[in-house]
Image: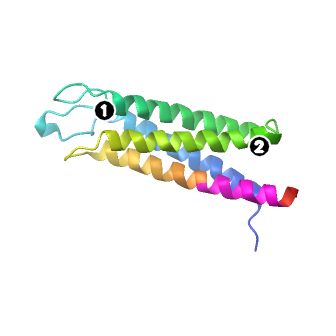
Amino acid sequence: MAISGRILFVAGIAITAVSALFCIIGLATKGWRNEQIGGGGIFCNGDGCNRAPAALSIISFILLIVTVVALILQMLDILRGILRYVPTLILFVATFFLLAAFTSYFKDIVGYSFNLMVVAHFFSYVALTVMAYWLGLTDASSN
């Protein structure tokens, strides 16, 4: 039984939106470090401000939102031709930024906000896989 291309496409949009949701929850919480050692949120920790993970996380969140909008535009058949590859490329870049965000913050002790960013990365990677599979199906059917 073949999976409909439309179902894959909608699943890709939904998974990308869930990834953006976990990303914003991870950014909004303060559990990036153990509070007993003087930790704070992602924007400023106890032993100085390291803003690289915060900037990478915010960029990845913005890219995930742009991806959802671009995928909706593609679903409405506004993006045609070579432009239909743009949402997948943006999603790849967002996935890369999410990976860089939580690996640049990695310390000995991490909290639940770190885990939320890992979950966001996982969902964006799954969405990227689904969208790549969908693009492969549409390319094969158009030839």
The spot of residue 56 in percent (x, y) is 42, 33
Q: Amino acid at mark 2?
A: Met
Mark 1 → mark 2, Cα distance in angstroms: 35 Å
Q: Main secondary structure of the magenta part?
A: helix
113 vs 9: above or below: above
Find disc 2 in the rendering and name its residue: 75
Q: Secondary structure at mark 1?
A: loop
40 vs 120: above or below: above
| Residue 39 location, quadrant | top left
The spot of residue 128 in percent (x, y) is 59, 51
As rendered, which of 48 and 119 lies closer to the eye? Answer: 48
Instruction: Point out the stretch of residues depicted in magenta.
Output: 129-140
Classify mark 2: residues with Cα within 10 Å, few (<14), some (14-19) or many (20+): some
Q: Amino acid at mark 1?
A: Ile
Q: Secondary structure at mark 2?
A: helix
- Quick check: 5 left or right of 37? right
Q: Residue at x 17, y 29 (%)?
A: 46
1 vs 77: above or below: below
Find disc 1 in the rendering and name its residue: 42
| Residue 55 location, quadrant | top left
Which disc number belongs to residue 94? none
Q: Residue at x 30, y 39 (%)?
A: 105
Asked if residue 71 shows in the view, the reply is: no
The spot of residue 95 in percent (x, y) is 51, 44
- How many numbered marks have been drawn onto this rendered protein structure? 2
- Quick check: 84 left or right of 33? right
As rendered, which of 13 and 63 lies closer to the eye? Answer: 63
Q: Mark 1 and mark 2 in contact? Answer it, CB < 8 Å.
A: no
| Residue 132 drawn in magenta | yes
Classify mark 1: residues with Cα within 10 Å, few (<14), some (14-19) or many (20+): many
